[in-house]
Image (spheres, rainbow, N blue to C red):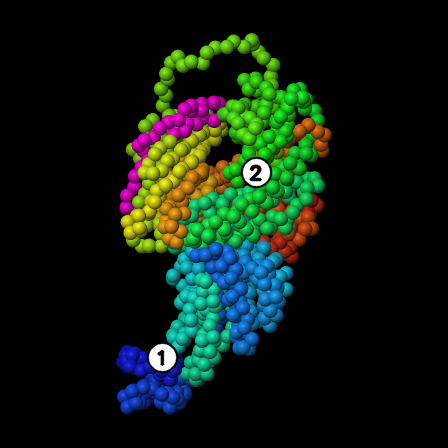
Amino acid sequence: MPGIVRRLDELFKKTEGPWSERILAELDFALRISKNSENGLEKEIETALDALERRAALDGFIGQAAAEEAEKMLAAAAAEAKKYTLLCASHAHIDMNWMWGYNETVAVTLDTFRTMLRLMDEYEDFTFSQSQASVYEIVAEHDPEMLEEIKRRVKEGRWEVTASTWVETDKNMPCGESLARHILYTKRYLSGLLDIDPETLNIDFEPDTFGHNVNVPEILSNAGVKYYYHCRGYDALSLYRWESPSGNAITVYREPLWYNSGIDSTVAELVADYCIEHGLKTMLKVYGVGDHGGGPTRRDIEKLIDMSRWPVFPTIRFGTFREFFKTLDAVADTLPVVKDELNFIFTGCYTSQSRIKMSNRIIEGRLNEAEQFAALAAKTGTFKYRGDYLESAWRCALFNHFHDILPGSGVIDTREFALGRFQQAAAAANTTLAGAMRHIASLVDTSRIEDGGGLEETVSEGAGAGFSATDYGVSIPERGRGKTRIYHLFNPSPRERTQTAELIVWDWPGDLSRLKISDGAGDLPYQVVEAKKGYWGHDYAKLLVFATVPACGYATLTLGESEPEKLFTAIPGDPRVDRFEDLVLENELVRAVFDNENAALLSFTDKKTGRDLIDPSRPAALFRVIEEDDSCGMTSWRVGRYMKITNIDTNVKMKKPALGGGLRKQFSYSAGFGASRLDVTVSLDRGSRRLAFEVECDWQERPVKGKFVPQLNFTAPVAYSCSGYRYDIAYGTLFRNDLDSDVPAVSWGLAVPQENGADALMLISKTKYGFRGTGDSLSLALIRSSYDPDPYPENIMHRFGLALELVPAGTANLALAENAYDYNHPLTCVAGTRHAGSLPAAASLMRRVEGSAAPAAVKLKESGDGGLIVRVYETDGKDTEAVFEFFKKPVSASFVDINENTLEGKAGIRVAGHRVTFPVPAYGVASVCVEI
């Protein structure tokens, strides 16, 4: 055999031309199937090879006569060769806005599809496959006549729709609900647009996605998607079953070659070995020019037609991905099982173009709250739930999940379009959320609250228009007047929260020193943070109040002025004594000590156990500038080796005054470094174990090509030995071992102690994804000045938040998820007025009563029939019963899938009184439709 291989190689080198290419490719294939043939084909191969060598020596080439003569000698091999099939599925990989703007994406899509349709007119057997709902939306909007042609080819079975997601999405950074919405909206949209059965959209086609979280099989299984196609993130097996922690699994084909390729005579080289290894007779060949569209060429089609006539070659025919995956059903139970995440590749993409990351986290969180309160408002009152309006916002968010947009590997036009889409989505989500909360507030009976007088000269009504919207928040203007004001605090969490909340009071005519706030049961602790701040012709005061707000509900607060207890005496406020105090933030639960010189965290102690999580010899909460080695190139895709680390621990200036009140203690500092500036406020609230860092950074560091890429980083070494690190992922959490590389998390990481029963440190992010757990420390990549393909993506003013939380021993994953959710979803205040109503002063509209299942979504059904969808995921690896209680009595409840189809025959739901109880498997996702 080695001798035959050598001789065949020599002929490849010495001869050329179409007949030489043909017969030598056939010999190569015959040789490959010979080793798997019971009788062997070496004799026939050697005979044909002898003849070809003689003709080549005499003629200097291999012509038609010599090739056909050799094919006759290989007649025995021909019969064996045709037992194998190469199924050829063409595809055009169309990147959404990778190195160009949306206008070019539209042009690429339409030009590519027009070419495919013309080729179909000429080649009656030619088939084409295309993913991504977004490209069909482009056609529908920009060339409706073409859409009719595509629909006709879809009906013929020659145009295959391989889309089950809105775009070929990133799978590491979007939350679980986002990945679910990709499928929900894609199936609904395409089944209507193209008049196809949504059940046929059962392939998740992700050829270029940069890694895949371990819960992808769970999400796909819950949405009727059976098959997965990918290239990156894994390099061991090309055909396997991928199983999520819940046990749900899908069949996966990892492209053994590549998804962008042309057609030549080498297409059969892997067929025999691949088929024998997996017990198949069919292999898939994906072909077509891609990235910037294009698809298969005429040459590709002609070549396949030509090779299909070669006698000593596999059966070659045009086909579809769905056709290939169906052949795998017969061997699915025998395939090896993979149970891990399919990571890591392109770790820089967890940080690059950080404003796109910011936009994603904000819009995911806002849509979560908007849908929930809109649905509950609709069930409680007469609020109109605008599902189509919310879907339009989701489509903007889903488009930005494309694997070159959210990962930050695009150009300036990519970034600008993404942020524009984000603003559209934020407008819809914020408007919906504000409207839902206002509607609920309008139903609350506040008629017994006295007006307090001082109404004639009021200027407060309408003050604060757009106040919070500056930072993409919900705009909640003042509606009250006079000295008595009414406010409603809203809690999006499924459990009651007692904590510090922020109130903005506009143009209040009273004396702040005599302020009082009550919730009907008594006066509440409060703290004045800012007084008499100006904003567009109005003044406001920023207050903190310590209140209890029911789960997924609201509480009503009354703000007024108390009677004076003593006569006022004017005392000059001139300084009399300078006091020098240590930087300590302390409440009833924890004590945090910071370095007076550089604001590094030296100690973080649990006051109940006395355990300190920080070693002062390895200070934490340090910001640092890292110079990354850029020698590997692709700087937006890759985090380079750390060459130099410089702590920002000099030129640190404390700002006055520090805040030392009863509800929040905080201090602020600034630090200059390089050409940049960092302004940080560190705070600790009453009843909290969380140190919150609010950061404003004027980042002006620039890369030096060929030398380094600068990075801003936050690090928190711990004083204990770590067994590893736990991170949140889509619909769950994942334990990872120590790894000196950035890894993705949706919002938090936990340094897991080796010692059982020990406190732990948790790092939570508001808008960042790139964590690193190594060397008994957690760190977070904040800003990276990559320079390709976007040369200057980060030289702007950045605002972001992060937190360090002391987690008591034995805290379950559910509580960790709740901690992160609460940090990223603060209580929201809505200004109210005095009026009659049907709702009490405080109420929970829905709450989780029992079970280790965290809610992922509360919404109304897309069908518009009024069903309330509650989706949960189990967090702690145990079968559980989820119990939810509703303000109004449910009539019935049923299991549904992610597509909101009723799961007939799936039992176990109980409805009793105001409660719905249903089982959730360990690490599983469950969706329930509740009729109220």
Query: What type is the residue that disc 2 sits on?
Result: Val
Q: Which residues are magenta?
A: 642-669
The dot on residue 153 is none
Q: Let me know if residue 664 is in the magenta part.
A: yes
Most frequent secondary structure within the magenta stretch: strand
Circles 1, 2 touching at the beta carbon (< 8 Å):
no
Name the quadrant containing residue 117. Answer: bottom right
Residue at 50 percent of width and 25 percent of height: 530
Answer above or below: position of 582 versus 382. above
Q: Earlier in the sequence, mark 1 or mark 2?
A: 1
Answer above or below: position of 555 versus 274. above
- Percent x, y of residue 453: 66, 19
- The residue indicated by pointer 1 is 28
| Residue 470 in sight | yes
- Percent x, y of residue 928: 62, 49
Residue at 48 percent of width and 62 percent of height: 94
Q: Is residue 779 left or right of residue 85?
A: left
- The residue indicated by pointer 2 is 474
In the foreground, 76 or 662: 662
Query: What type is the residue that disc 1 sits on?
Result: Asp
Instruction: In the displayed orientation, state which residue is furthest to the front.
Output: 537
- Percent x, y of residue 559: 60, 24
- Percent x, y of residue 733: 46, 47
Q: Let me know if residue 242 is in the magenta part.
A: no
